[in-house]
């Protein structure tokens, strides 16, 4: 077995251990990638997984979940909370979106391959050793170094109507002002897609980014995690908070057509109309050239912005989401 879960879920209280994935390299012949995992085992109730750090440059979720490891009192937990705050540990240690060891993006590798690359083997270990223990999954993300998100609950719905309803209710319960539900993405391979394949209730977030955290973004992520547990009955109930139901489509993305310095015309939270300017692209090599105004192709709310001003062809410089309703989202 090239991966093991070293965690005693049969004993009440806080336990800690690790997901261990064999990694033999020049530094350590019989080495392992050691992904720390904690569990709070309380009374009768559901088992849930709280995940963060799938991308190593998004620290909002990891910090929120590490706070929870310290704060959760097993005496008030009804169920089992498995907390994996630094899921892609090699990437988190390097503050990188992808693995410094094999370049793998863990959010493109699920369900993984036990005989594949290191990142594929980490994904396979999560799929086969962590997910089977739980009925619901929360996966916290942010914009990382290259994007910044206004805080949003963020997820995809299961194809089965009953599970889709449960995942949507979980997303709406996360206490974020906006709840963005996306369709199946072309790339796939995410913890969300694997959780859906295994029939879990699944929710997530996109909160903050821009290369670092603020008290506000960590607080939003912690609120999402606590309210997810409260929604599932693991923690005492929280009063409902209003949220704006939104979705995302390809025309909502504004991409750079070429290399240049992008001078934005909008900021997070702005409401725009199709045809409005998103910003202006200047040629850094020939600054006297006529600049190009990039325009929105759809109406919507600015929910994310690209962070680096120097952009390459295909980079997302800003993206929108638009209002929707439950009838349009549920299968
Ligand atoms: Zn992410």
Image (spheres, rainbow, N blue to C red):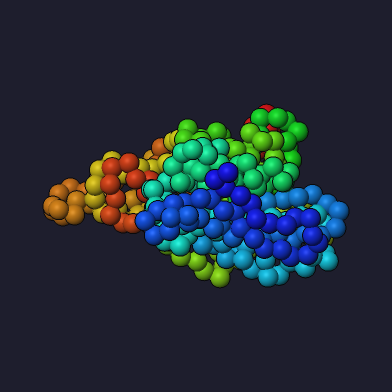
Instruction: Reply above or below: 162 against 301.
Output: above
Which residue corresponds to the image point at 59% horizontal and 46% vertical from the top-left? 126
Residue 74 in picture, x, y percent from top left: 79, 65
**In this rendering, is residue 263 above or below 313?**
below
> In front here: 57 or 248?
57
- Of the 4 image quadrants, the one containing the C terminus is top right
Residue lying at 38% horizontally and 48% vertically, measured from the top left? 103
x then y, percent, for residue 241: 72, 56
> Is 290 placed left or right of 196 in the picture?
left
Residue 194 vs residue 157, the one in the foreground: 194
Split into 4 quadrants, where in the image is the N terminus?
top right
Check the image and name the residue furthest to the right: 44
Side of 246 where 228 appears, left or right: right
Q: Nearer the viewer, residue 108 or 309?
A: 108
Marks counted in the figure total 0
In the image, taking residue 315 as reference, residue 304 lies left or right, namely right
Image coords of residue 279 (percent x, y):
33, 50
Q: Quadrant of residue 240?
A: bottom right
Which of the two residues, 177 or 128, is positioned nearer the viewer here? Answer: 128
288 left or right of 48?
left
Q: Residue at x 57, y 47 (%)?
A: 3
**Residue ID at (78%, 64%):** 13
The image shows residue 194 at horizontal and vertical percentages of 60, 38
Observer able to see residue 310: yes
Q: Is residue 329 visible?
A: no
């Amino acid at each position: 077995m090239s991966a093991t879960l070293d965690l005693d879920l049969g004993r009440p209280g806080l336990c800690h251990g690790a997901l261990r994935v064999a990694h033999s390299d020049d530094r350590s012949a019989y080495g392992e990638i050691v992904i720390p995992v904690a569990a709070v085992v309380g009374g009768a109730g559901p088992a849930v997984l709280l995940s963060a750090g799938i991308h190593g440059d998004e620290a909002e979720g990891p910090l929120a979940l590490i706070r929870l490891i310290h704060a959760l009192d097993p005496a008030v937990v009804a169920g089992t909370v498995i907390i994996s705050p630094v899921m892609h540990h090699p990437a988190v240690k390097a503050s990188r979106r992808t693995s410094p060891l094999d370049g793998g993006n863990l959010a493109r590798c699920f369900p993984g391959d036990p005989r594949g690359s290191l990142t594929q083997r980490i994904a396979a270990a999560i799929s086969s050793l962590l997910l089977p223990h739980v009925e619901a999954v929360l996966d916290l993300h942010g914009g990382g170094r290259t994007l910044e998100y206004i805080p949003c609950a963020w997820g995809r719905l299961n194809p089965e109507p009953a599970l889709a309803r449960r995942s949507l209710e979980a997303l709406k319960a996360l206490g974020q002002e906006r709840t963005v539900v996306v369709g199946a993405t072309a790339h796939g391979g995410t913890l969300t897609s694997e959780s859906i394949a295994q029939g879990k209730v699944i929710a997530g977030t996109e909160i903050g980014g821009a290369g670092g955290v603020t008290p506000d973004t960590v607080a939003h992520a912690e609120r999402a995690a606590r309210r997810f547990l409260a929604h599932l009955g693991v923690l005492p109930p929280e009063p409902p908070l209003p949220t704006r139901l939104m979705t995302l489509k390809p025309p909502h993305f504004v991409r750079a057509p070429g290399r240049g310095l992008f001078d934005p015309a909008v900021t997070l939270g702005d409401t725009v109309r199709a045809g409005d300017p998103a910003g202006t692209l200047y040629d850094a090599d020939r600054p006297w050239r006529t600049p190009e105004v990039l325009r929105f192709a759809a109406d919507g709310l600015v929910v994310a912005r690209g962070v680096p001003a120097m952009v390459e062809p295909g980079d997302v410089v800003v993206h929108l989401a638009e209002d929707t309703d439950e009838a349009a989202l549920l299968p």
